[in-house]
Amino acid sequence: MGFALNLDLQLASSAFTADGAIPTRHTGEGDDISPALSWSNAPAGTKSFAVICHDPDAPLVSANGTYGFVHWVLYNIPGDVTSLAEGCGDYTQGQNNFGKTGYGGPMPPEGHGQHKYYFWVLALDAEPDLSAGLDLWQLLAKVEPHTLAMNRLVGTYQRG
């Protein structure tokens, strides 16, 4: 099926509302821990999930033509899981654009204004046993053929 935005699949956070401000606690200026997330209405046949956080407003373009800044890549999440606790260290952590694995919270450049942060959940029809440390683009190349549905929750953050 490929990438399909699916409005039945819902993603939410107890830390912020859709298009609302992400609390400083979840940013590089705060405790730098991931917000709690939960999802519902995954399509039939879902066997696993992946979660991504990406900032398309970051003024970065890589050599391969990708843009923005990746804050979190998490995968190998079993299909019966419907939430992630705050500060989640479970499942398989990929590499963010800080050059580390795990979550790295929002921290736009000083004076760069408000950025939007897209938290994505992908419902997959397979249980991939992927190795740790994949970057976003490596993960997407592996899971794209298995993506049944995806949806996002957008939060905002501005320094200062």
Image (cartoon, rainbow, N blue to C red):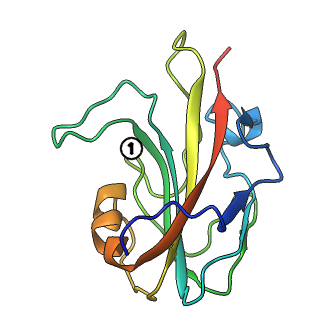
Q: Is residue 159 above or below residue 62?
A: above
Residue shown at the point (68%, 81%) measured from the top left: 81
Task: Identify the residue shown where x is 36% and y is 70%.
Answer: 2
Q: Quadrant of residue 84?
A: bottom right
Q: Amino acid at mark 1?
A: Asn
Left/right of residue 61 with respect to residue 159 in the rendered view: left
The image quarter in which residue 77 lies: bottom right
Q: Is residue 21 left or right of residue 92?
A: right
Residue drawn where x is 72% and y is 52% of the image: 35
Give x and y (percent) for residue 45.
54, 90
Q: Which residue is mark 1?
A: 97
Percent across and percent down for residue 112 are 51, 14
The residue at 75%/58% (across/down) is 36
Residue 121 seen from this side: no
Q: Is residue 94 left or right of residue 81?
A: left
Residue 96, position as x, y percentages in the image: 42, 50
Q: Quadrant of the C terminus?
A: top right
Q: Quadrant of residue 78?
A: bottom right
- Residue at disc 1, secondary structure: loop
Q: Residues within 10 Å of mark 1 (few under 14, many from 20)?
A: some
Q: Is residue 118 above or below residue 30?
A: below
User: Does residue 117 appear left or right of residue 3 in this picture?
Assistant: right
Query: Observer-nearest residue: 117 or 130?
Result: 117
Percent coordinates x, y for residue 117 in the rendering = 57, 39
